[in-house]
Amino acid sequence: MSTATATKRWKGLLASLILSGAGQFLCGARRRGIIWFGIVCALPLFLLEIYTSPLVPAKAAIPLLGVNMIVWVAMLYDSHRPIRRLRWWGWVILILLSFAVSDMYSRLAHHLFQVYHVPTIAMTPTISDGDDVIVCRFAYWFREPHRGDLIAFETSGIKSIPKGQAARDVLFVKRLVGLPNDVIEIGGGGISVNKTKIEFGDPAHPIEYRNIQRGGLPQEVESYSVPPGEYFLLGDNSANSYDSRYWGTIRRSAIYGKVAKIYWPWNRMSTPH
C-alpha cells in the first residue's frame, strides 16, 4: 500500500474500535475482517448459551468473560495496520453502520436472553429480593415447560391483576407447579399433584407451601384444578407470594422464559433449582 493511499496504523485500530473487523476490511483483508466481525458478534451469545446450561457453575461467568475479552483484544491487535484513507464522510458512514449493527445485535440478544432484577421476597429462599437473574428465552422453543421450572412470565394478560397495580405489565418469576389438567392440593405445609406428594428445593429442607386461608401452617387442604393449556404457578415463599392461588392460571403464550442463573450479587451466584 503506497504512502499516498495509506494512513497510520492506529487508524486501523480506531476503525475496529468503531466496528469490529473494520480495520482489517479497510486495509484490503476483507475476508479476514468479515471473519473477525462474525467471531466478535457470535462469541458473546455462544458463551451466554454455555453459561445458561445447568451443568455450568454460575461463577464460570468470570472466565467466560475473560475468554470474550481476550478474543476482542486479539481482534484489535490484528487490526493495527494501515488502512485506505477515509474522508470525513467515510468515518461518519462507519459510525452509523456501527449504530445499526449494535441495534440489530441488541434486538437479537434480547430475543434470546433477558436480565431481570427480582424486586420481591416472593421466591425466597430460592431467589432473594435484589437478586439479578438471567432468563433464557429460547428454553421452551423446542420443549414444553417442566414441573418445578423457575419461569418468568408476562402479567399483562392476567385480568385478575388490578389496573394500576405495580406488578401489572411486567414480568413475574414463579415456580411452575401445575401442568395442564393437573389437580393441585395444598395443605399442612405440603403440596400434592394428582394425589402424589411432591417436594421442591433442597431435599434436606424442602420448601413449605401454605394455602391462603390463614397465616399459619393450615390443616385444611385447598384444591385447584388446572384447565387444559394452562399452568399453575407458586412463589416459594408462599406466605408472601401473589401467585396462581390469587389470580389463577396462565396461558402457555404468557411464559417468557426459564430462569437459568442468579448472576449477581457475587455471594448469591448460583443455578437455582
Image (cartoon, rainbow, N blue to C red):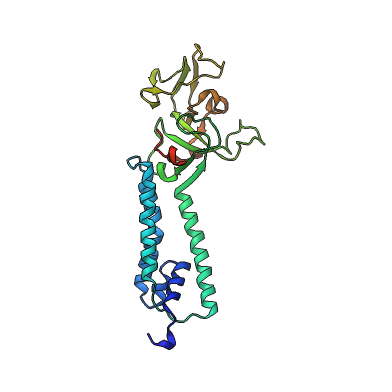
Q: Is residue 259 visible?
A: no
Q: Position of residue 168 (x, y in %)?
A: 61, 37
Residue 162 against residue 30 in the figure, above or below:
above
Question: Total of numbered circles in the picture?
Answer: 0
**Quarter the C terminus occupies:** top left
Q: Where is residue 233 in the image (x, y as percent from the top left)?
A: 49, 29
Task: Depth check: give the residue in front, 38 or 230.
Answer: 38
Q: Position of residue 209 (x, y in %)?
A: 47, 21
**Quarter the N terminus occupies:** bottom left
Q: Most extreme residue toward the top, as rendered?
A: 219
Q: In this view, does 211 lie to the left or right of 272?
A: right
Q: Which residue is drawn at 43% across and 71% down?
A: 13
Residue 153 against residue 190 in the figure, above or below:
below
Q: Where is residue 223 in the image (x, y as percent from the top left)?
A: 49, 18
Task: Depth check: give the residue in front, 226 or 29.
Answer: 29
Residue 245 against residue 102 in the figure, above or below:
above
Residue 68 location, quadrant: bottom left
Residue 218 against residue 67 in the figure, above or below:
above
Q: Most extreme residue toward the front, as rendered?
A: 267
Q: Most extreme residue toward the right, as rendered?
A: 164
Q: Which residue is drawn at 50% across and 55% down?
A: 107
Q: Which residue is drawn at 42% across and 45% down?
A: 138
Residue 269 location, quadrant: top left
Q: Can residue 5 be seen in this view?
A: yes
